[in-house]
Image (cartoon, rainbow, N blue to C red):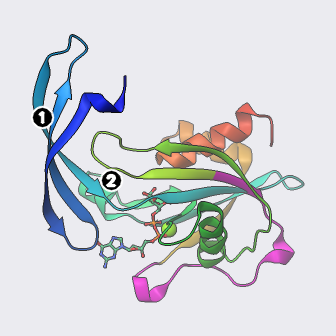
Amino acid sequence: MTENRIRIDQEEVLSDNWYILRKYSYQYQRQDGATQQQVREVYDRGNGATILLYNLEQGTVILIRQFRLPTFLNGYHGFLIETCAGLLDEDDPETCIKRETEEETGFKVSHVRKVFDVFMSPGAVTERIHFFIGEYEHDSRSHVGGGLIEEGEEIEVLELEFDEALAMIDRGEIIDAKTIMLLQHLRLKNIL
Ligand SMILES: Nc1nc2c(ncn2[C@@H]2O[C@H](COP(=O)(O)OP(=O)(O)O[C@H]3O[C@H](CO)[C@@H](O)[C@H](O)[C@@H]3O)[C@@H](O)[C@H]2O)c(=O)[nH]1
Ligand SMILES: [Mg+2]
């Protein structure tokens, strides 16, 4: 598989509002050498970062709860439990996640560890999310968190026993992909 099997012929902006939705027309070369014209819509909202904060002594993790309209529209009550996360904007992933951690949870973290990065919805969205873990301490909390009121954020900070968070996946109470992946990562690598 090489890049030269793909030739972008046309790009049309369908919506350029908060983020950008484009329609692409491209030539796709199949494995037998035949070419095919294909059309796909792609949503570009930049890249993001997320972090699972954990405390080794207490055996706890920090998660957040906030309203997510797309989940509400798809039959859920909308108040999703997630790991802290944000869009990169102009920052590198590590700077972004440290900033988001303080904005959303109030904790200042100085050391974070990158674990992997992931395309979360590769059929439709360009976004690649950088995943981190990091230890938090109560005395490094500068405020109660909550996010930015002017951006409409109302973020509830939850401190949970790690085993309880894992049980919440089994009970269907945690249903966000990045959150499940990071909780399972801590267990798989015997970190907590
Ligand atoms: N007015 C307006 N505001 C928007 C719109 N879309 C997003 N916002 C606002 O833009 C801000 C983005 O906040 P961040 O904390 O930077 O991003 P996030 O929404 O938490 O996204 C993170 O999690 C996503 C879900 O897993 C990830 O997709 C993303 O990469 C990132 O990690 C939020 O205040 C959100 O309400 C929109 O269409 N209109
Ligand atoms: Mg966020």
**Percent x, y of residue 191:** 80, 41
Image quadrant where one finds the N terminus: top left
* Image location (x, y in percent) of residue 192: 80, 43
Is 151 within the magenta?
A: yes
Q: Is residue 129 magenta?
A: no
How crowded pointer 1 is (Cα within 10 Å; few <14, some 14-19, many 20+) is rated as few
| Left or right: where 159 falls relative to 169 | right
* Residue position marked by numbered label 2 in the rendering: 76
Asked whether mark 1 lies closer than 8 Å to ligand 1, one says: no
Q: Position of residue 65 (x, y in %)?
A: 52, 64
| Residue that lies at the very extreme toward the left in this rendered image | 37
Q: Is residue 138 above or below residue 33?
A: below
Check disc 2 and give the amino acid type: Tyr
Marks 1/2: CA–CA distance: 33 Å
The amino acid marked with disc number 1 is Gln
Answer above or below: position of 137 versus 164.
Answer: below
Residue in front for this viewpoint, 12 or 70: 12
Residue hosting label 1:
38
Inspect this view and state whether residue 103 appears: yes
Does the image show residue 83? no
Q: Residue at x 59, y 74 (%)?
A: 104
Q: Residue furthest bottom?
A: 150
Q: Is residue 155 left or right of residue 69?
A: right
Tell me which segment is drawn in magenta: 132-153
